């Protein structure tokens, strides 16, 4: 809206869209102002009763009307996924033995040999700890 060079032609679809967007912006500005006024009244009165977030929630619902539908859709999708997971039966856990014990012991031995060589070189002053 703010980057438009001029008004769209009278009676065109672009004009209808622009008018709808302008009305929406005005509506959101008025709700935002009402939210701020109610929050200021609540803060100024110092009362502990009432819900200070009521108007803010109303403002967010007006600002993002599609969020409620998304929440419900997300809940149903999550329920379906969980239902499918439960239908698969009980969960079984098996130990992972990806490396044969021979390879593990060889790697351990080779690592120990490297450490011993480094320690020997440091003892001889060939390399410094650093």
Image (tube, rainbow, N blue to C red):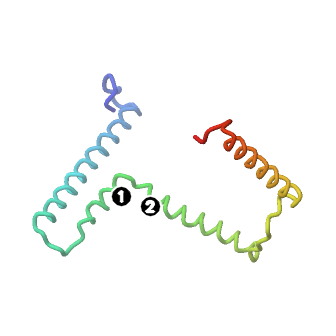
Helix, strand or loop status at disc 1: helix
Q: Residue furthest toward the left?
A: 45
Residue 109, x across and y down, in percent: 82, 54
Quadrant hosting residue 73 = bottom right
Front-most of residues 24 and 15: 24
Please give left or right for residue 126 compared with residue 103 in the image.
left
Residue 84, x across and y down, in percent: 70, 69
Front-most of residues 23 and 88: 88
Answer whether labels 2 and 1 touch (C-beta < 8 Å): yes
Residue 53, x across and y down, in percent: 27, 65
Q: How many residues crowd around disc 2 within 10 Å: few (fewer than 14), some, or many (20 or more)? A: few
Which quarter of the rendering shows the C terminus?
top right
Helix, strand or loop status at disc 2: helix
Where is mark 2, residue-wise? 68
Q: Residue furthest toward the front?
A: 124
Quadrant hosting residue 47 = bottom left
**Spatial CA span between label 2 and label 1:** 8 Å
Query: Which residue is at a point 50% across and 58% down the rendered structure image?
Result: 70
Q: How many residues crowd around disc 1 within 10 Å: few (fewer than 14), some, or many (20 or more)? A: few
Front-most of residues 45 and 14: 45
Front-most of residues 98 and 1: 98
Quadrant hosting residue 121 = top right
The label shown at residue 22 is none
Where is mark 1, residue-wise? 61
Residue 64, x across and y down, in percent: 39, 53
Query: Which residue is at a point 77% across and 52% down the rendered structure image?
Result: 112
Counting residues from the start of the chain, the first of labels 2 and 1 encountered is 1
Please give left or right for residue 121 compared with residue 36 in the image.
right
Which quarter of the rendering shows the N terminus?
top left
């Amino acid at each position: 809206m703010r980057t438009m060079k001029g008004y769209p032609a009278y009676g065109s679809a672009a004009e209808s869209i622009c008018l709808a967007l302008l009305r929406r912006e005005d509506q959101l500005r008025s709700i935002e102002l009402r939210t701020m006024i109610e929050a200021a009244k609540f803060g100024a009165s110092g009362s502990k009763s009432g819900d200070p977030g009521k108007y803010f929630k109303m403002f967010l619902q007006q600002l993002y009307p599609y969020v409620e539908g998304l929440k419900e859709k997300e809940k149903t999708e999550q329920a379906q996924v969980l239902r499918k997971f439960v239908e698969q039966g009980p969960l079984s856990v098996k130990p992972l033995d990806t490396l044969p014990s021979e390879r593990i012991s060889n790697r351990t031995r080779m690592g120990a040999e490297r450490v011993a060589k480094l320690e020997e070189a440091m003892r001889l002053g060939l390399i410094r700890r650093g």
